[in-house]
Image (cartoon, rainbow, N blue to C red):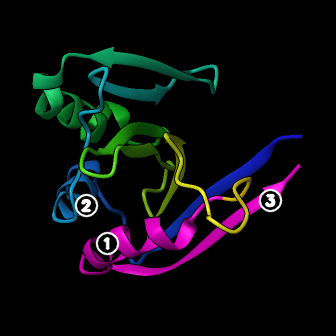
Amino acid sequence: MSRTVDIEFTFRSPITVSSVVESLSQSGWSPTEPLGISYAREGEDGDLGWESAAPDSSNQVITFLDSPQSQGHVVGISIYNQEADTGGLLLFFADRTQVSFSPSINRRKLAVAEEMTDLPWYLDRMLPGLYVTGLLGYQAQDISD
């Protein structure tokens, strides 16, 4: 049995990867995870091609994801909260008004039901920064498939 866990964020107007990463950094999030930086851009075949980069190349990676050549394509970047030792994937959909977060690095679990994700913990640490960047709302789910 698998689980689908994600938080879908909706913004008033198109948002950049740099503005989201910067707003989340106020709550301890960073694109640098234990193994470096993971990022992706949708290819012509519609698949995401995930790549890794050195920890000191976050500015170049974010610039690439926000570049004109990446516009109209789904892009993704991992974010990590070092203090909490957890993180996940941010996917920016082509219109850049929809962003999805999937906790995938040391996913935080609920104490009363360890198979479920502690989505309130993630929301508490993500919403303050995202709200000031034009967040309209969110939808969170943790569903057994």
- Bin the neighbour count of mark 3 within 10 Å (Cα to Cα): few under 14, some 14-19, many 20 and up: few
Query: Residue 43 location, x and y as percent?
Result: 53, 22
For residue 59, say whether it is visible.
Answer: yes
Q: Residues within 10 Å of mark 1 (few under 14, many from 20)?
A: many
Residue 120 inside the magenta-drawn segment: yes
Locate the N terminus and report the quarter of the image it occupies: top right
Inspect the image, locate mark 3, and give the three-letter code of the amino acid beneath it: Ile
Where residue 113 sits in the image (x, y, percent)?
A: 73, 63
Q: Name the residue under label 2.
A: 24
Image quarter of residue 33: top left
First along the sequence among labels 1 and 3: 1
Between label 3 and label 2, give the one nearer the viewer: 3
Q: What residue type is labelled 1?
A: Leu
The relative height of residue 126 versus residue 131 in the rendered view (above or below) is above
Label 1 SS: helix
Residue position for label 1:
130
Q: Earlier in the sequence, mark 3 or mark 2?
A: 2
Q: Which amino acid does label 2 sit on?
A: Leu
- Quick one: label 2 or label 1, which is nearer the N terminus? 2
